[in-house]
Amino acid sequence: MFRISKTGTGFEVVHKFCSEGVYCSDGVYPAGGLVVGVDGNIYGATSQGGTGSNCPGDGCGTIFRVTPSSGEYEVVYSFNLLTDGELPQGLTPAPDGTFYGITVEGGKLFHFTPATGALQSTALSFPLPQGCPGFACFAASVLVLGPNGNLYGFYTVYDSSAAGLFEVQTNGSNLQLFPALSSGIGPEILLASDGNFWFPSFAVSGYGEIVSISPSDGAVLQTFSPFSPSAAVGADPAVLVQATHGKLWGTTTAGGKATKGHRASGTIFSLDAGLLPR
């Protein structure tokens, strides 16, 4: 984990996570992005590591906190396989200052309260495709709060092309899976100012797309496909955010323009999709 000023100066490594295959009580394999708590501290999750019980050799995952003024790193919760599941996929801030998330193994929706350090977990009843032994047949993305106050995320069925949006209430009830999409899903989803979800897709139609979908039924509303290895905008979009003026901004992991003798390795791009300011 690093920090750097907005001018590009003052680069500093705040915390170094463990190497692959090495047990780490501080956590290993950061999952999802970093989020800011109401206390002004930075929070995040690791998919493995920690000191939780009933876990495999690399641990079940952690929730950690970083104090910006000092850079102090501290694990504030270690997942227990039996009660919490393992492999948390990141943290989603709620208006009340708490965080939500989901674990891949065990299929648990968790709710973490930073002020007390308490974590509550609820098993989600994802339907199992024929031949699948358990929740491991599904992968779930970082969650986002929808316009109706429910949690949304992407599901993917292993060894299948099925991937789409799901919705669940914050207490874990009324889980609903929307029909699978033809576009490849991204790791994170954005609730934009139009009340719809937007995300960068994988390279299903060549080199990636920007897609918007409806939170009411998961249907595709708009698709933008400006990406290619020869395009100035680059190829394979990976991250998407919305600025206050309404435009979408993101990054690509390949392509773009480079000076002669050099290889282009991604871009920062903007997309004017006609969205209102936030």
Image: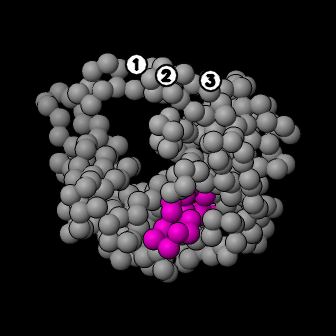
Please tell me how crowded label 3 is: few (under 14), some (14-19), or many (20+) other residues with Cα within 10 Å.
some
Could you tell me the amino acid type at mark 3?
A: Cys
Q: Give coordinates of residue 191: x percent, y percent.
A: 40, 63
Q: Residue at x 45, y 59 (%)?
A: 189
Q: Quadrant of residue 10?
A: top left
Q: How is the image coloured?
A: one colour
Q: Is residue 3 visible?
A: yes
Q: Which mark is residue 123?
A: none
First in residue order: circle 2 vs circle 3: 3
Which residue matches tag 1?
12
Q: Give coordinates of residue 130: x percent, y percent.
A: 76, 72
User: Looking at the image, is 128 positioned above or below residue 139?
Assistant: below
Q: Nearer the viewer, mark 1 or mark 2?
A: 2
Could you tell me the amino acid type at mark 2?
A: Gly
Q: Quadrant of the C terminus?
A: bottom left
Q: Is residue 225 left or right of residue 148?
A: left
The front one of 267 and 12 is 12
Q: Give coordinates of residue 249: x percent, y percent.
A: 27, 52
Q: Is residue 182 visible?
A: no
Q: Which mark is residue 71?
A: 2
Verify CB contact (< 8 Å) between mark 1 and mark 2: yes
Verify CB contact (< 8 Å) between mark 3 and mark 1: no
Please tell me how crowded label 1 is: few (under 14), some (14-19), or many (20+) other residues with Cα within 10 Å.
few
Image: magenta residue range: 140-157
User: Looking at the image, is 130 positioned above or below residue 13?
Assistant: below
Instruction: Determine if the magenta segment contains residue 147.
Output: yes
Instruction: Determine if the magenta segment contains residue 99.
Output: no
Q: Residue at x 60, y 40 (%)?
A: 45
The front one of 84 and 265 is 84
Q: Which mark is residue 18?
A: 3
Q: Residue at x 68, y 66 (%)?
A: 171
